[in-house]
Image (tube, rainbow, N blue to C red):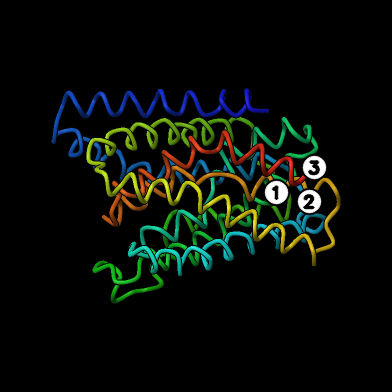
Amino acid sequence: MSERILAIIFPVFIVVALGYLYARRKGAAAAADMVAVNRISMDVLCPLLIFTALAARDFDVIGNGWLILAGALIALGSGLLAWPLARLLGYDVRSFVPPMMYNNCGNMGLPLAALAFGAGGLSAAVALFMACNLVYFTVGIRILQHGHPDHRDSPWRFLRSPMMLAMAADMTFAIFHIALPASLFLALKMSGDACIPIMLFALGVRMLDINFASWRIGLTGAAACPLAGLLMAFLLEQVLPLTASQRGQMYLFAALPPAVFCFMLAEQYRQEPDKVASIVLLGNAAAVLFVPLGLWLGLR
């Protein structure tokens, strides 16, 4: 399992390193180069990535109902646990809490679930992916928006964002089992998949601005995200009627690190993106320790 985790994480750091080297060579111009690229990613490519990740998997919403509830409660509970920690340590809640609520349940969670639980485990992993997205793109975005000058007059504008529209389409396709034509789905998936290396490259560019304060919050977030998730999973295990497989999936989900997408939104909202970048980078490095712990707890 550790080898599989390394196989997933190592290419991530290679692409991040390429972005960092590009920023070192170009200097301040590198950040300017990424502005338009990041906007395209946020408005077009990332919504397609989320849509195709769910539309590609046929899963039983009713059969995974308790697991969807568990995923939503883990995301919400992790945010609630992170909030007083951020206040105690003097971190901006808008920078620290959202990454604690949205883990890497797509790029890392889906392949790890297939490895640990077989092809049949993908259905449950997609259910957790859906729950996490629903929480983040409602509650998490509202936290990130709070006090932002562009959203003072229309606090619910995010409901019309490409991400929320993609989530609404996901729910419709999942509930009614609507299948797209193969050629159309392939075109959408190719476009969505392009978002992943672009996000990682942009993360590498931002690494040039990271200082000691950023590394400190990064280390805190790298530990707080999986530990808060695992604590929530332990509490939910006591009350939810989950099967043995669902229990294992829940613990794997809870142990995952913050998603790279959190950095993209921090960049878009100009919400201390250097600190969020550090949380994401160090969190994914720490996954080598926390993901095996989550699997051991889930499969014990």
> In front: mark 3 or mark 2?
3
Name the spot of residue 39 as percent of width and height, x first. Answer: 31, 45
Instruction: Tell me, yes or no, whether the two marked residues, 3 and 1, touch with CB atoms within 8 Å.
Output: yes
Residue that appears at 45% across and 51% down:
221
Upstream in sequence: badge 3 or badge 1: 1
Q: Which residue is mark 3?
A: 299
Residue that appears at 72% across and 58% down:
234
Q: Residues within 10 Å of mark 1 (few under 14, many from 20)?
A: many
Q: Residues within 10 Å of mark 3 (few under 14, many from 20)?
A: some
Q: Secondary structure at mark 2?
A: helix
Instruction: Tell me, yes or no, whether the two marked residues, 1 and 2, touch with CB atoms within 8 Å.
Output: yes
**Residue 296: quarter of image:** top right
Q: Residues within 10 Å of mark 2 (few under 14, many from 20)?
A: many
Q: Which kind of residue does numbered mark 1 sit on?
A: Tyr
Q: Secondary structure at mark 1?
A: helix
Residue 251: give its label: 1
Name the spot of residue 271 as percent of width and height, x first. Answer: 29, 57
- Quadrant of the image containing the N terminus: top right
Residue that appears at 64% across and 53% down:
230
Nearer-the-camera pick, 117 or 209: 209
Q: Which kind of residue does numbered mark 3 sit on?
A: Leu
- Quadrant of the image containing the C terminus: top right
**Residue 115: quarter of image:** top right
Is residue 291 depicted above or below 250 in this figure?
above
Upstream in sequence: badge 3 or badge 2: 2
Residue 46: give its label: none
Q: Which residue is mark 2?
A: 247
Number of marks in picture: 3
Cα distance between the residues tagged 3 and 2: 8 Å
Cα distance between the residues tagged 3 and 1: 9 Å
Cα distance between the residues tagged 1 and 2: 6 Å
